[in-house]
Image: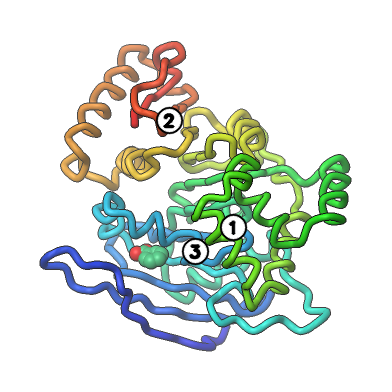
Amino acid sequence: MAELQEVQITEEKPLLPGQTPEVAKTHSVETPYGSVTFTVYGTPKPKRPAILTYHDVGLNYKSCFQPLFQFGDMQEIIQNFVRVHVDAPGMEEGAPVFPLGYQYPSLDQLADMIPCILQYLNFSSIIGIGVGAGAYVLSRYALSHPDTVEGLVLINIDPNAKGWMDWAAHKLTGLTSSISEMILGHLFSQEELSGNSELIQKYRNIITHAPNLANIELYWNSYNNRRDLNFERGGDVTLKCPVMLVVGDQAPHEDAVVECNSKLDPTQTSFLKPGKLTEAFKYFLQGMGYMASSCMTRLSRSRTASLTSAASIDGNRSRSRTLSQSSESGTLPSGPPGHTMEVSC
Ligand code: BEZ
């Protein structure tokens, strides 16, 4: 495993008073499936896992995760963790286009590259955050290396292989749509796309004009050829670590995430719709013993207290933990006590 390249950059994040700029360092390592690039922010914290992210198709680590990691409320979380942001091969900024006939790794092979990254950094465990294809890659890695994954945040995951109906629909769409439109259809709902907001225009522009669009198509093909993860609740093939499943309202993958939730261990799985992802992530880390309640907002602390008491009232911790969230104000009506955790937004 040879190191190919190391680049040091200083992030231009706006600094809070008294803060020193965090240095980000980009590395590439050689793996049995080709080279992979990743960027490390922060310094390793003793006895803490690294947060490792994996982005979706059509994006890279920055376009996928910068909005979340630079969000104000996220700062108190990330200062406690070193972060490793993986770019799928050929997705890193300035990546050259792969030569014609290049065999792009399957999603399973992308997962098999992760041990090379951790070995290079000498990190023994991670909390993974993955979106779409990246969520699949991290799940596959967690299935094969359960002892190294302390927790997973899976956003818009589809754990199923495409069925023949999906393939037929995909082929039909391919006749009338460009690759970039198909990828936008994977990233956003039809409502969002037809609304054509500034955000949609920005991502359409990024993807359509990406100099590495040919590489993006290869990652897209690997995603569409994924195998079924075959999760089985109570079976051998399941995620052993705490999992936070996240799906957007009307997201293209809403049904797939709901089905995934039904197949995972309910004692280990939280399911929420975004709105206050950062706050939910704090609860998640706190549940794993990594966030002191003093780091949480007063509101969060009072909610945590009531959630804890709900758990002790029904005396049953083996339940599906659903964090129902809405971007509208107000707390959603809940299901039976003890089955639904609510976080009002
Ligand atoms: C981070 O602080 O981990 C981060 C900064 C910029 C982009 C993505 C992540």
Q: Which mark is residue 326?
A: 2
Residue closer to the observer: 154 or 215: 215
Q: Position of residue 185 (x, y in %)?
A: 68, 50
Q: Quadrant of the C terminus?
A: top left
Circle 1: residue type: Asp
Residue at the image position 28 percent from the left and 63 percent from the top: 45
| Mark found first going from the N terminus, 3 or 1 | 1
Residue closer to the observer: 229 or 328: 328
Residue at the image position 24 percent from the left and 53 percent from the top: 76
Q: Is mark 2 within 8 Å of ligand 1?
A: no
Circle 2: residue type: Ser
Determine crowd level at label 1: few under 14, some 14-19, many 20+ residues with C-alpha closer than 10 A: many
Can you tell me which quadrant of the image ligand 1 is in?
Answer: bottom left
- Is residue 234 in view from this perspective? no
Residue at the image position 41 percent from the left and 34 percent from the top: 327
Q: Position of residue 23 (x, y in %)?
A: 30, 76
Which residue in the protein does label 3 denote?
63
Q: Quadrant of the N terminus?
A: bottom right
Circle 3: residue type: Ser
Q: Is residue 234 above or below residue 30?
A: above
| Mark found first going from the N terminus, 1 or 2 | 1
Q: Is residue 58 above or below residue 35?
A: above
